[in-house]
Image (cartoon, rainbow, N blue to C red):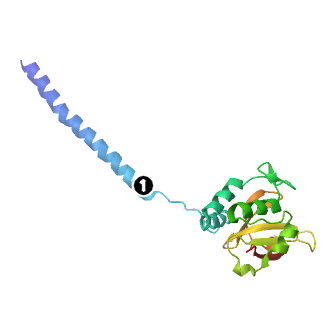
């Protein structure tokens, strides 16, 4: 009888120990997680990178159809004379964008597009205005569509349809005209 009483007493004493042990482990784990979360370092993306500024320009667009149009065409490769997702050139991209988003029919060639825009100072450009460049001499040979905050979208010969920084010296040196079609 004494053996049974001793075994029962021992078993009953283990139950509170097991219960307290499990509860203590739970609190210990909770404290470890809390302390480790306080000590983790939070990494932030630098907001002054070219990519983040281009993303900001896209996020700040007033026209949601323009946003959708650009995101739908971004990355399409450049193809001289192209006018579809298989490849597009700069004047074709401006032609399609102005027609689909603003209902304006432009000439198909960038030099002719430059002839129909009303000249504007770069500082006064608005979303949808056109910017023209001359990379190969005096004549206009490239066009892009102004977005905001110094960014424009165009079909780059090397990178395809992309949002780019108009304030880069490479573009500033060859910018010959900017303006609106309206």
Residue at the limit of the structure toward the top, as seen here: 1
| Residue 25 position by quadrant | top left
Residue at 77 percent across and 67 percent down: it is 144
Q: With respect to residue 41, does 131 lie above or below?
A: below
Q: Is 158 left or right of 48, judged from the image as shown?
A: right
- Residue placed most toward the observer, 33 or 123: 123
x and y, in percent, of residue 88 in the image: 81, 55
Residue at 78 percent across and 76 percent down: it is 178
Q: Quadrant of the C terminus?
A: bottom right
x and y, in percent, of residue 64 in the image: 60, 62
Q: Which residue is mark 1?
A: 37
Q: Residues within 10 Å of mark 1 (few under 14, many from 20)?
A: few
x and y, in percent, of residue 109 in the image: 86, 64
Residue at 71 percent across and 77 percent down: it is 125
- Residue placed most toward the observer, 159 or 161: 161
Residue at 68 percent across and 53 percent down: it is 72
x and y, in percent, of residue 5 in the image: 8, 23
């Amino acid at each position: 009888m004494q053996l049974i009483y001793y075994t029962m007493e021992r078993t009953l004493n283990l139950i509170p120990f097991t219960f307290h042990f499990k509860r203590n482990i739970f609190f210990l784990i909770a404290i470890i997680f809390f302390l480790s979360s306080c000590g983790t370092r939070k990494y932030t993306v630098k907001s002054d990178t070219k990519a983040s500024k281009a993303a900001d320009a896209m996020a700040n667009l007033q026209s949601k159809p323009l946003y959708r149009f650009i995101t739908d065409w971004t990355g399409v490769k450049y193809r001289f004379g192209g006018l579809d997702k298989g490849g597009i050139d700069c004047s074709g991209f401006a032609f399609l964008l102005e027609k689909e988003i603003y209902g304006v029919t432009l000439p198909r060639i960038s030099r002719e597009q430059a002839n129909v825009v009303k000249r504007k100072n770069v500082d006064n450009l608005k979303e949808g205005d056109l910017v023209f460049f001359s990379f190969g001499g005096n004549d206009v040979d490239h066009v892009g569509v102004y977005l905001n905050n110094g960014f424009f979208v165009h079909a780059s010969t090397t990178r395809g349809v992309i949002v780019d920084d108009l304030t880069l010296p490479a573009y500033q040196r060859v910018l010959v005209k900017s303006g609106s079609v309206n």
